[in-house]
Each structure stands twice: as structure tokens, then as C-alpha cells.
Amino acid sequence: MSAMIPENIVHKKVGDETVLLNFDLGVYYGLDPVGTRVWELLAEGKTAAEIVEVMLGEYEIDRDTLARDVDALLAELASRQLIV
């Protein structure tokens, strides 16, 4: 899955978490530290597969679980119109 962050999304890192805001819809969304890492990689233009590859080297988790979790987070963000 390839996703992009739209121009109308504002994000602010607070400690090790990130708060997202869709100005057009007034939708707020919070990311935990792992979700924040996914967001950072997404902001770098990485695809879901590339995000999984990077995070496999950073976290102790199996590929299938990580891929499912990344896909689920990206789907959630897309459903809230925080990514396209």
C-alpha cells in the first residue's frame, strides 16, 4: 500500500507520541510511539512494504505481524482521511 499525507493534515510530535489534525474535517487522531514511527516513515515517502522493512530492524517482531499492524494502521488513517 502506498499512501500520502495530504496538505491539510497537521501533525505535531508530543514526547514520543504524535497528534494528527485534519483541518478540513476537524478530526484529531493520536498515535502511540510505534504509530509515530510509522507516520515518520510515511512522511519520508516510504510505502507500507518499505516501512515494514525499516521497522523489522528496529523492533523485535515477526514480519507477518508487523505487516498486518502497519496495514491496519494505514487503513485506519485512510478511513479518517488522514492519508490518501
Image (spheres, grey):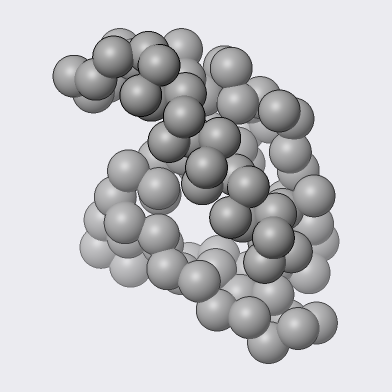
Percent position of residue 43, x then y: 62, 41
| Identity of the residue drawn at 63% across and 81% down | 27
| Identity of the residue drawn at 70% across and 54% down | 78
- Asked whether residue 25 appears in the rendered view, the answer is yes
| Identity of the residue drawn at 76% across and 43% down | 4
Percent position of residue 37, x then y: 40, 40
| 28 w.r.t. 39: above or below | below
Which of the 4 quarters of the picture holds residue 56?
top left
Which of the 4 quarters of the picture holds residue 1?
top right
Percent position of residue 22, x then y: 69, 75
In this view of the protein, which residue sits in the foreground, 10 or 79?
79
| 27 w.r.t. 53: above or below | below
Count of marks overlaid on the render: 0
| Identity of the residue drawn at 25% across and 63% down | 15
- Asked whether residue 39 appears in the rendered view, the answer is no
Percent position of residue 20, x then y: 54, 68
Q: Is residue 51 left or right of residue 33?
A: right
Q: Is residue 56 left or right of residue 49?
A: left
| Identity of the residue furthest to the left in this view | 60
